[in-house]
Image (cartoon, grey):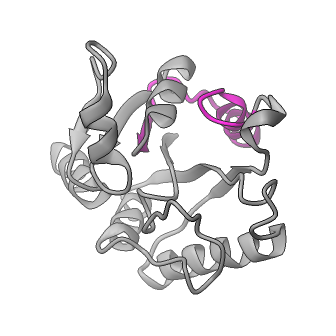
Amino acid sequence: MKLIILDRDGVINEDSDDYIKSLDEWIPIPGSIEAIAALSRAGYTVTVATNQSGIARKYFDEYELAGMHQKMCSLVEDAGGEISGVFFCPHGPEDDCECRKPRTGLLEQIECEFGTSVEDAPFVGDSAKDILAAKLAGCRPVLVLTGKGKATLAEAGEGELAGVEIFASLQEYVKALLQSGSPV
């Protein structure tokens, strides 16, 4: 199984410091939907692992979140692809849960759901939490410079991004991955 893990906000859709709280606020980053569809058509099992503390903060509920995820999946399907699973953490930072990135609970859920290991699977994110979760789970961390990616790059300490592939966007990463014929 060719597995790939994507963060959501800032990788697939535009991000906001005020949170993405509604269907209307969920706006795909140009090229991201087509990139996901291309991954799917190339045989990748595409999964999404996303912290959604807006639920714990009562900015939106799980029904609103489900609507956002349905929109995302429908757009990918309309482009000829499929997202095989969306895994989210509804907790706030103070909840000390195992599923909130940078902890690896979401990645363990993906392993359980698909009966495979996430080790060596690309994990595309835009934050230090994504990169750390990827490293802790043995994934191949990829940083995109959309969303919080530029700030993450600027704030990274020495060695923090060692071994991390860096791309302008999900679309650029997918283009490089698929052109190489093997993992980037």
Pick the quarter of the image with the C terminus.
Answer: top left
Q: Is residue 184 visible?
A: no
Query: How many marks on residues?
Result: 0
In this view, 7 is above or below 183? below
The residue depicted at 78 percent of the width and 34 percent of the height is 94
Q: Position of residue 129 (x, y in %)?
A: 51, 33
The residue depicted at 46 percent of the width and 63 percent of the height is 15
In the rendered view, does 32 fall on the left or right side of 26?
A: left
In this view, 158 is above or below 39? above
Residue stretch in magenta: 99-125
Q: Residue furthest top?
A: 159
Q: Position of residue 14 (x, y in %)?
A: 42, 68
In the rendered view, does 102 fall on the left or right side of 58?
A: left
Tell which of 40 and 8 is nearer to you.
Answer: 8
Determine the image quadrant of residue 23. Answer: bottom right
The residue depicted at 76 percent of the width and 76 percent of the height is 64
Q: Is residue 174 visible?
A: yes
Q: Position of residue 57 (x, y in %)?
A: 78, 57
In the rendered view, does 36 fall on the left or right side of 60?
A: left
In this view, 14 is above or below 94? below
Tell which of 111 and 57 is nearer to you.
Answer: 57
Check residue 21 for magenta coloring. no
Q: Position of residue 25 (x, y in %)?
A: 55, 80
Determine the image quadrant of residue 79. Answer: bottom left
The residue depicted at 64 percent of the width and 31 percent of the height is 116
